[in-house]
Amino acid sequence: MLNKVSIVEAIFETSEDGILFCDTDGIIKLWNRGCERIFGYTENEAIGKSLDIIVPQNMRQKHWDGFHRALSLKHTKYAKKSLSVVAMHKDGISVPIDFRMNILEKDEKTIGIFAIIRDVVETTTPFFS
């Protein structure tokens, strides 16, 4: 019989959407195959790196301001609505994405942020095509 942990692991590993988790310093701790496809970095290349690897240089200050604000408030409006931004692929090209994020807490302590990311270019297929 499948347990909750094995089901969550299977979802994480097979999702076409990117799923990542970073600690409160913005260091990537989890990175799935969806992230590999969207951003071009393998799991081994991304784990332990700053989110800066996917945030364009000209957006980093705004990104980190929002990141730290969400952590201090222990809340983000982007848990319920998507944020559309341009991210950066390993090859240096711009990647339009939508994402939602949530603050993750354990034992009433904030441990980081997780995000579910969708490549906008790949979601533009008409529904009835």
Image: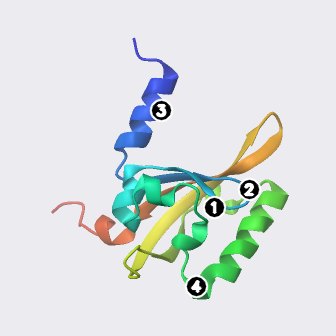
Query: Disc 4 marks which amino acid?
Result: Gln
Taking 29 as reference, is 129 left or right?
A: left
Disc 2 from disc 1: Cα separation: 17 Å
Dot 3: element = helix
Residue 106 position in % (x across, y down): 75, 36
Whichever of callouts 2 and 1 sits on the residue coming sooner in the sequence is: 2
Picture quarter containing residue 90?
bottom left
Separation of marks 4 and 2 at Cα, in angstroms: 20 Å
Residue beneath disc 2:
24
Q: SS class of the residue under badge 2?
A: loop
The residue lying at 42 percent from left, 76 percent from top is 96
First of labels 4, 3 by sequence position: 3
Depth check, front residue: 44 or 2: 44
Picture residue at 37% right of the left edge, 66% below the top: 40
Q: What label sits on residue 57 in the rendered view?
A: 4
| Mark 3 or mark 2, earlier in chain | 3
Q: Which mark is residue 62?
A: none
Mark 4 / mark 2, whichever is N-terminal: 2
Task: Give the residue at mark 3.
Answer: 8
Type of amino acid at the residue the image marks with label 3? Val
Residue furthest to the left in view is 129
| Image depth: mark 4 or mark 3 in front | 4
The numbered dot on residue 78 is 1
Q: Residue at x 73, y 60 (%)?
A: 25
For badge 1, the amino acid type reads Tyr
As measured in the structure, the alpha-carbon distance from the residue carrying label 4 to the one carrying label 1 is: 22 Å
Q: Nearer the viewer, residue 98 or 5?
A: 5
Q: Viewer-nearest of labels 3 and 1?
A: 3
Up-down: is 124 above or below 128?
below
Confirm or deny contact between disc 4 and disc 1 (CB under 8 A).
no
Q: Percent x, y for residue 126?
A: 23, 66
